[in-house]
Image (cartoon, grey):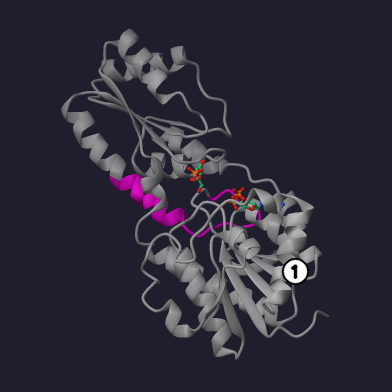
Amino acid sequence: MSKEIKTIGVLTSGGDAPGMNAAIRAVVRAATAKGIKVMGVRRGFNGLLTGDVFPMDRRSVADIIQRGGTTLQTARCLEFLKPEGQQRGAEICRVFGIDGLVVIGGDGSFKGAEKLANLGINTIAIPGTIDLDVACTDYTIGFDTAVNTAMDAINKIRDTSTSHERCSIVEVMGRHSGYIALWSGLCNGAELVLIPEKPVPTDEEIIKMILQNKHKGKQHFLIISAEGVGGSERLAKKIEKITGMETRASILGHLQRGGAPSATDRIHASMMGSYAVDLLLEGKAKRVVAYVDGEYTDFDINEALAMKKGIDEQMYEISRLLS
Ligand code: ADP
Ligand code: F6P
């Protein structure tokens, strides 16, 4: 059984995601309501190493539940990859009296949290990433907002693409994960979805599909491609050259990481933040909060990191069937 928790730290790390603020708020309010002190850590593990740590009370998280980004700011911290950096991080936690730490981020941040836990700081991780690429959980904070943002942008691209009878390639975020592409492809009725988890058709196969569609009388052709597949501009030029159909590539980029969090993100963030505090108060450490089959649960960080997330096969097949 771990020692009694008196002070909890909270930080956000890695790529930001809409809903991180709602998670910070939940951690601060759930903890203070139970008589636990909270310290905010700015700029992820960087802030820990520079001692950028400050006390937070329930008022300090007023008016942030609706805001995108993270008010604690986020960063990548190379020094934390090294054992000396992790040692220093644990020592700084002790200097500030932080005996439990909530880390909100993706898989990379979980590894940092795991290292701190091994050095005696009780850590709990909360999945916050728009990519939905954390294997132990059905949901990661930020995904719903990002998909809705992509969907709105694609709706607009589709309008102009239809007017001009063009082919559009829209590249959405996901360096290693096709979830945003798959969901936005299905909800925008894309003709083709390209994701890193599945074999990408050859240029010739794609061009054949476009020509067949053209002969069926379709006025436009919409391809949604995940960032990890790459080559959107090159493919657009080749399609235009061979099919004669004007083709444009649009890379949606970081707008998908911003914006006010959706209701779904605010709810999951609130539930997960408060669940993380409960775990710390139960004396738990080195756990990841997860949402599985409609319920909140938790896993050992190492077990969670060893899990592999595939793509949703059923959804992938349906997106092809309906295209
Ligand atoms: P995400 O959390 O979104 O997956 P990153 O992979 O960029 O983002 O990781 C965020 C930060 O987590 C890194 O900059 C680093 O400080 C820390 N981190 C990542 N991997 C490790 C590791 N193996 N050991 C310790 N810390 C790590
Ligand atoms: O937040 C996840 C993600 O959006 C990935 O899809 C993308 O590869 C990465 O972040 C890019 O992040 P940055 O531009 O901040 O390095």
**Picture residue at 42% right of the left edge, 51% below the top:** 257
Q: Secondary structure at mark 1?
A: helix
Residue 294: x %, y % from top left:
56, 65
User: Where, quadrant-wise, is the N terminus in this rendering?
Assistant: bottom right
**Picture residue at 57% right of the left edge, 40% below the top:** 313
User: Where, quadrant-wise, is the C terminus in this rendering?
Assistant: top left
Quarter of the view holding residue 19: bottom left
Residue 321: x %, y % from top left:
44, 34
Residue 127 shows in this picture: no
Is 133 covered by the magenta stretch? yes
Pick whichever, 62 or 44, lies toward us: 44
Left or right: residue 117 versus residue 135 is right
The residue wearing badge 1 is 91
* Magenta part of the chain: 132-152
**Picture residue at 50% right of the left edge, 69% below the top:** 23
- Residue 162's place in the image compared with 49, above or below, is above
Is 58 covered by the magenta stretch? no
- Residue 112's place in the image compared with 191, above or below, is below
Residue 86: x %, y % from top left:
74, 58
